[in-house]
Image: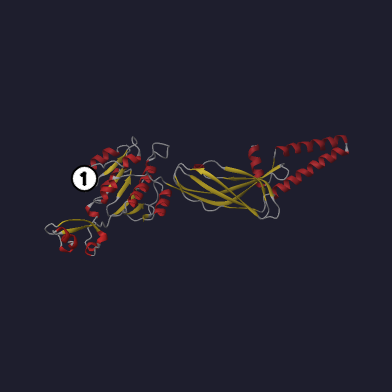
Amino acid sequence: MLRRMANWLEHHWVAPAYSGWLLVGLTIFFFIAATNTLTGWLYVLSGIGLALLVLAAFTAGRSLQGIKVHRPPIHPTSVSDQVAVELILENLSPQPRTLLQVEDVPPPALGRSVSRSIETLPPKSQQSWIYYLPTRQRGVYRWQTVFLRSGAPLGLFWCRRSRQVKAVAVVYPTVLPLTQCPLVDEMGRDASLQFNSDRHPQMATEGMTRSLRPYRWGDPTRLIHWRTSARYGELRVRELELFNGGQELIVCLDSAAFWSSHTDDPTADAFEQAVTTAASLYFYACHRSMSVRLWTAGTGLLKGNQAVLEVLAAVQPGETTHAQERPSSPLVWLTQNPASLAMLPVGSRWILWSSAGAIAATSNLQPNLVERRCPGLIITPQQTLQAQLQSPLVMR
């Protein structure tokens, strides 16, 4: 009760420090002693103590006036990296501010509140403070409260005031360094997603020729390399590069469904693994020069590295569906619901996180998935996620 009252006084007015309570007691003692003995010097001592208390209480409240707090934008980071947070304190008053304590209060997911003491803040000047917060889970974290605390100039009273300075820290999901991913590789080699461009070879130059080979019956005469043929005394034909077109990969995250979790560890949570998988597949396909897009129930189709990372940092299971229906073209479906696999377009791929009855339900769907050429992966907790994403597909 006393602690709560002291906190209320400190936030709304001033609260006595230990030395302040001690001086209050001595002042009351001298005043009572002076009243009983009618001794003048005791009245003087009690008056001096009262004057010091009033002066300290008044100046402690004014010591935080004229201080403005700025917060530059926080640069995004990834899981397991540290978030760099910067605060800039500006003294707008013509007098220096001394003995300050600054406290920033981030969300509990980023750790406890962080404080720093500043001995002197010169007049009309700024002072920067940078500190780092550890990250364990992706997300978009927002907070805005910064506390300024001071006991200046005598240290008899504490005064605390809050400043509302908005902060947004974006923590991107982990992107696994995949050396191979059969799910994406086989989908990229799917005949329905490729075509051979014969327009470019018609205008081919020496720089677009991959190799030369002997002439075979049926080869177009426009591909004959006459200079080399004259040198070898037989017809030689240019082999041109194969131009792949239409290789579009759509990574779809089943974010509208409610995902079950059997552990408090965020790295083992099924939905968190699905978000990590979506980011890893997206950037793996980008490195293979494929056209790739991301789909979630809340945003629909989107493209661009930063846009994808920001959406995956903020997505949560069971979100409201604002997007249109899933694309009708072949896609990669990340889900925990085996029943949703039956509605996949022909040629799609899927990744299923195992839960109670998920494997049995997938076995019942296998004939239908095989007919529509929809192989996939079942993620289990026995192996690491990276190893399973690099393993062969089910029902090949």
| Identity of the residue furthest to the front in this view | 231
Residue 101 picture quarter? top right
The mark total stands at 1
Counting from the top left corner in percent of width and height, residue 126 is at 63, 53
Local packing at callout 1 (Cα closer than 10 Å; few below 14, some 14-19, many 20+) is some
Query: At 23% across and 60% down in the image, what residue appears?
Result: 197
Identify the residue under disc 1. 370
**Quarter holding the N terminus?**
top right
Q: Is residue 88 left or right of residue 237?
A: right
Disc 1 on helix, strand or loop?
helix
Counting from the top left corner in percent of width and height, residue 145 is at 57, 48
Q: How is the image coloured?
A: secondary structure
Residue 390 appears in the picture as rendered? yes
Counting from the top left corner in percent of width and height, residue 341 is at 27, 46
Q: Nearer the viewer, residue 214 or 91?
A: 214
Residue 90 appears in the picture as rendered? no
Residue type indicated by callout 1 = Val
Query: At 28% across and 38% down in the image, what residue appears?
Result: 359
Counting from the top left corner in percent of width and height, residue 205 is at 25, 63
Residue 354 picture quarter? top left
Query: At 31% across and 42% down in the image, what residue appears?
Result: 390
Q: Is residue 307 left or right of residue 44?
A: left
Q: Nearer the viewer, residue 131 or 57?
A: 131
**Quarter holding the C terminus?**
top left
Q: Is residue 83 left or right of residue 247?
A: right
Residue 242 picture quarter? bottom left
